[in-house]
Image (cartoon, helix red, strand yellow):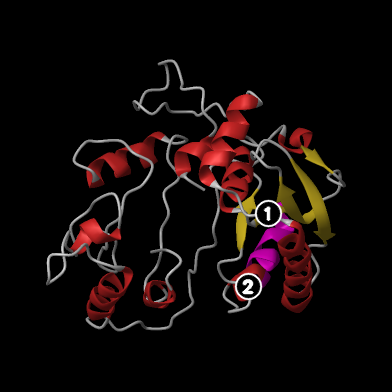
Amino acid sequence: MFASEEFLTASEKFVCIRIETYENKEAEEKVRALLNGRYANTAFCLFDPQGERRLTRSGRGPSAAFSNRGRDGEAIDAGAVARQMNQIAARFKPNRDQTGVVLQDFNSFRQALNVASADQRLLVCVNVEDKHRKNVESNLRDVFSDEEVGGKFHLDFLDPDADKAWSKSIRGKTNQPGILIVRSGKFGLDGVVMATLSHSDDAAVIKSALLDANEKYSNTETRKQYAQHVQSGKRQGVYFENEISREGTSDQPRQNRNRKGRRGR
């Protein structure tokens, strides 16, 4: 469904919030609230513009949020879900006010690197001094709202407390502040810097560098096949240690499975 053009077009009328599970207690609580206490790696629901009132049922996927069956008793498809999403979107009028637009960010660089690998996207890592951050954020808002860029990259701002050892897992130039374009490794435990930009580079320069890096990445990256990827990780003993276990506690033994296998990426 998430590869359906009709569904993707409908989703552009919404603010899409993706909760990364197993890394944050607050995120765990949100997922449990959507799944009646259960804890899983996917949940889907549509909310009002304030993000407080549910407009649909919640479930593991889009189909469950609307109806389990179509008019003829067949499983609901992407087109039917998209049509219902469009009907909901038509009830609200966007004000087009860009004030306060929030950029993507992760709980940690470790998490960002892992998710970027799972989704097979390049990671834009921001490592700049506080005095330059406002200008960098302004440029990145312009870039990430561009139709040629949207949905093709992940973005993370380094945190001085959570990401003290971030550079140990990355090969390439990491000793100077800047905006790094990082290619995550196969299992999201390491990566390499493809390009580095300065905090003074404008939106046009950043966009050009991103698209150039993405073209090179797309020409060499092989799409992952779920079963093969999981088996490969098991054979190599890959282990991504989560902050929160699948059972939802931080002190229980964690399952020895890499995150991409669980996420189905």
The residue that appears at 25% across and 36% down in the rendered structure is 38
- Kindly state the secondary structure of the residue where label 1 is placed: loop
- Tell me, for residue 149, which label it has, or none: 2
Q: With 200 as the anchor, is 8 left or right in this view? A: left
Residue 174 in sight here: yes
Magenta highlight range: 127-139
**Which residue is tagged 1?**
222
Q: Quadrant of residue 137?
A: bottom right
Magenta-drawn stretch, dominant element (helix, strand or loop): helix
Residue 240 locus on image (x, y percent): 57, 29
Residue 99 locus on image (x, y percent): 48, 74
Instruction: Decide which of 90, 61 is in the foreground and name it.
Output: 61
For badge 2, the amino acid type reads Val
Q: Closer to us: mark 2 or mark 1?
A: 1
Residue 197 locus on image (x, y percent): 81, 62
Q: Earlier in the sequence, mark 2 or mark 1?
A: 2
The residue that appears at 22% across and 53% down in the rendered structure is 58
Q: Is residue 49 above or below residue 111?
A: below
Q: Is residue 161 above or below residue 195?
A: above
Q: Quadrant of residue 222?
A: bottom right
Q: Quadrant of residue 231?
A: top right
- Kindly state the secondary structure of the residue where label 2 is placed: loop
The residue that appears at 63% across and 72% down in the rendered structure is 149
